[in-house]
Structure formats: structure tokens, C-alpha cells
Image (cartoon, grey):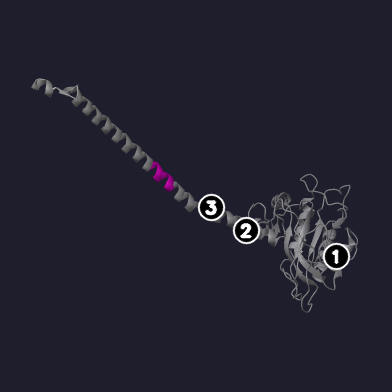
Amino acid sequence: MSRREALTSCAGKPFGAQTIAAENWLAYARIGTILVVGFMRSFAIVACSLVLAATASAEAKPKREAHHASKEKAKRSARARFHEPAKGSAPRIRAAYVIRGPIEGQSLGQPWQGKLHDPTQLAEGDGYVIRRPYRAFGTKTTVEFIHHAITDLREQFPEAHVFAVGDISQESGGQITQHRSHQSGRDVDIGLVYKSKPASFPEDFIPATADNLDCEATYALVNEFAETAKEDGGAQVIFLDYNVQGLLYHWAKDHGEDETILEHLFQYPSRGASDALVRHIPNHNNHIHVRFKCPGSDTSCRN
């Protein structure tokens, strides 16, 4: 083999072909390196994005949970304060109130866990019907406020149909059917006033509508109890359906009532928490539920 042939051949391959193959391999290697580096960079960017997103989510989650917990706590607090059951929950059975120590006063314990001692019974009278006399027992101040309000309303609206007084408490207080409260003689249900007496009234409380509700007389009824709020043992809160509040609110506003008075009286038109005396609670579109404060002399009583 000549020197030229030796130089142009290596292991049976021409020297020029070997050089080209090597250069191609190096080019492919560089391309492969670029692709790998590019992939690694992309992977790193995606990984960093996922880490940042996860971190942000982890930081936001406690805030969301705290906000949700705060809202739920507020709802539970309101339900506990006003004996409202959680939506879809089974009725809660509370242990009977146990009297400890000397008894001072008539109302013992809380409206939803209490008893009555030496109760006062609401007497029958003209112009109103006591739907269940065996549940017409309360504190002396509660009974007096009820009787005074009904009597005054009858004088203001002599042509109105008979009024309906629902449950206060049973003679000894404690749990009664159809109620979570009404245990300590400081709650009463009063039927609304209608333009004409519904067929099954006063045996049944009738849902109020714009067509059947006597807004003037019902507003006066609410006002009779509202005026006791500053008195000893007077109204603490009045429960009434939000939409029925709206009917009374607009009637009063249209008839010249001061808006400041209405804002302090009704929760309507606010949908949220309110310091108003009249507040929404479910299943109260056919009567008002008045809760009275503990009289000063009833030291065993709890609001």
C-alpha cells in the first residue's frame, strides 16, 4: 500500500469519510446537548412554577379556612343566641334544667334551657284568644306586658278580628313540643293581624302576604312590644320573617315614619347581622315571637 493510500484509508474506510462521520457525530451530540439543556430548563421552570403555586395555595388556604371558620362561627353564634337550628340538622335535645342553690325569682335559667317557679298565668279576656291555656304561664312582667299590649291594640283597632295569643310556657317551664325555647316564661307567640279574619284563625297562625296582612295594625302590634324594650323585663328581641318585616317597613315609611326609627326597629332591609330589635328567623312568617329580658329581681334568670 502506498503512503497516499495509507493516509486516505483507516480500517478499510477512507480518511475523508471518517472525518465527516466524526464531525456529524459531534454535530448530533451538540444538538442533543442543546435539546437536553433546553428540556432541563423547561422542566426547571415548570417545577419552580408548581412550587410557587403550591406555596401560594398553602399560604392562601389558611386564610380561606380562617375566613370560612369565621363565617361559620358567626352563624353558629347567631343560631346559639337565637336558638335557631342549623340548616338540615336534627332537633337538638337539651338536658332538663337543674335547679341549684336557692331560688330567686320566677324565671330560672335560659329561654332554651330553663324552668318556671311560682308562675303567673295570662288570664282570658275580651278580644283575644289564648290558644292553649295550659301553656299560658310566664313571669309576672312578661304576662303584664302581653296583657297591656293586647289591651292597647284592641283599643286602637276595635273593629279588628280577635287576636291570637300562642304559647308562653307550661306551668313548671321546661321543654315543650313545637318549640326550642319557651322554657323559662319569657317567650310568647302572638298571631298577626289581617284585613279580614282567615277561616282557620285563631286556631292556626296564617302566613302573611301583601294581600292579607293588615300592615297598620300589625305594625302597631310590633310597636306595642318594642316600646317595652327600655323597661325592666321588657322586650329583648322580636322574631319575624324578613319578608314580613319588609311589608311593615315599607308601609310605615310610606306613612311618614322616621327612617331612623325604622332602622333601629327592623333588621330589614339589611340581610346581615343587625342590632335591630326585630330580626329574621325561619318559620316566623305567621306570627311574632317576643322574648323578654330577665327582670331585675329574677337573679336566677339568664338572658
Residue type at the position of mark 2: Ala
**Distance (Cα) linking label 2 and label 1:** 32 Å
Identify the residue at image location x=85%, y=56%: 164
Horizontally, residue 84 falls left or right of residue 39, namely right
**Viewer-nearest residue: 78 or 272:** 78
Q: x%, y% of residue 118?
A: 85, 73
Q: Position of residue 52 (x, y in %)?
A: 42, 48
Circle 3 packing at 10 Å, graded few (<14), some (14-19), many (20+), is few
- Residue that protrudes farthest toward the left in the picture: 3
Magenta segment boundaries in residue numbering: 45-52
Outermost residue on the bottom side: it is 102
In what quadrant of the picture does the N terminus appear? top left
Reading the image, the residue beneath label 3 is 64
- Sequence-first tag of 2 and 3: 3
Around disc 2, counting alpha carbons within 10 Å, would you say few (fewer than 14), some (14 to 19), or many (20 or more)?
few
Which residue in the protein does label 2 denote?
Answer: 74
Left or right of 168 in this view: 22 = left
Q: Are dots 2 and 1 in contact, CB under 8 Å?
A: no
Q: Would residue 50 be counted in the magenta stretch?
A: yes
Q: Residue under circle 1? A: 170
The type of residue carrying mark 1 is Gln
- At mark 1, the secondary structure is loop
- Upstream in sequence: badge 2 or badge 1: 2
Q: Percent x, y for residue 104?
A: 78, 77
- In the rendered structure, find residue 56 and report the number of the disc placed on it: none
